[in-house]
Image (cartoon, helix red, strand yellow):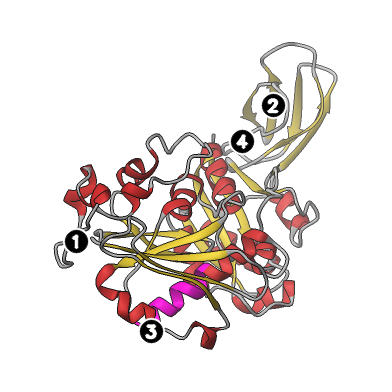
Amino acid sequence: MFEYIFTIGCFDKFHKGHITLLESMQKEGKKIIIGLHDNNSIKQLKNITDIDTYDNRKRNLEKYAYDIFTIDDADPTKSIKEYISKNFNEDIIPINIGSSSSNSKVIKNNYSGELFFIHDYKDRFKYNFKDDNIKITRIDNKNGWGQKLIGYKKNWCFIRADDNREFPSINYVKSIMPIKFLPYSKDISATKIRDYKNDKVGLMNYILQKVVDILDEHDIPYYLDCGTLLGCIRNNELMKKDTDVDVTIHLSHWDKLNSIDFNKYELKRTRTLNGYPKNIDGNMISVKTKYSNLYCDIYTNPAFPLLDNKTLNGKKYNVPFNSELYLTQLYGNWKVPSNTHASTEYHRGNGLVNSAYSKYWDKNYEIFKCKS
């Protein structure tokens, strides 16, 4: 395991691909150091303006990072050099050892610190110093070695996704540390999330953000529910196979929700259910964009949970406290993907209100009685 892992990136619209990449890095090293592009350098790189704030992107990374530094140019070389110089002020230039036909090789060099032999083979080496020479010996067999061996002065590695193997600053980075590429997630990207006109997940993300912003504007507390909550908690993503987007509010806010002119926000109301307290489906409004018939269902619940939050595609959303238990009431064994729909009985009405989840209802909200 490496002592330090370096990486750089934008980490915009912080999504499942980012999380998977960072979790893979955590398995490779103890301390992850991230160079994070500021918004101006992202504009230079990608010619976009719809960018999450630097502070928000940094907050999303903090649980994974040992340290985070700012990259203020499209070419990160200068920023990386400055960080390395400030935090690793000793000699870091590696020693080129090369190949050897014999079991040992002597290099003329007065360095006398630690050396790390980082390579793609199972070869193992030891070293010792004498009279301004370094003797390197292969210890797993006596056949010499064919690789161009390098002795690194730090136990570190640069890791990034393999979508750009010729990234700016590669020449400087490979002059001081090894580079490893991890598989790039093709299923999701910040570009796809932005493409709400053509990409389904992009559209789901767009309508979810739009509806939540409307609810926030009208001071209507909400939480992610059903398949949207399931994807967020289990998969760290909006599930492409899902048929809609789901959020829920407390029943006491129904009149306020029902009075909203969604046309003002370029959304079309397609369905209004006003069945409380007789209809098990309760009260609900469905809205859609002009780009697709994919809906966001805004449900009402006769009780309201204590809230937690979860980051999804770069934005923090409200989710029920102890979401795992909440999901268990809706789906049973929700951790195993299936085609099971959330139970309507437990979704709205007495079922969920009186379930094992009942101790997590927020006592500041009235619990309404439903007829079943």
* Residue matched to label 1: 362
The 10 Å Cα crowd at callout 2, few under 14, some 14 to 19, many 20 or more, is some
> Vertically, is 8 above or below 37?
above
> Vertically, is 109 above or below 129?
below
Pick whichever of labels 2 and 3 is earlier in the sequence: 2
Query: Camera-side residue: 65 or 172?
Result: 65
* Residue matched to label 3: 259
Q: Secondary structure at mark 3?
A: loop
Q: Quadrant of residue 218?
A: bottom left
Left or right of residue 125, residue 307 in this image: left
Q: Identity of the amino acid at label 4?
A: Leu
Q: Which mark is residue 115?
A: 4
Q: Secondary structure at mark 1?
A: loop
> Vertically, is 262 above or below 345?
below
Judged by its main secondary structure, the magenta piece is: helix
Residue 108, position as x, y percentages in the image: 75, 36
Residue 40, position as x, y percentages in the image: 64, 79
Q: Identity of the amino acid at label 2?
A: Lys
Q: Identity of the amino acid at label 3?
A: Ser
Pick whichever of labels 1 and 3 is earlier in the sequence: 3
Q: Which is closer to the viewer, label 1 or label 4?
A: 1
Pick whichever of labels 4 and 2 is earlier in the sequence: 4
Residue 205, position as x, y percentages in the image: 56, 65
Left or right of residue 329, residue 161 in this image: right
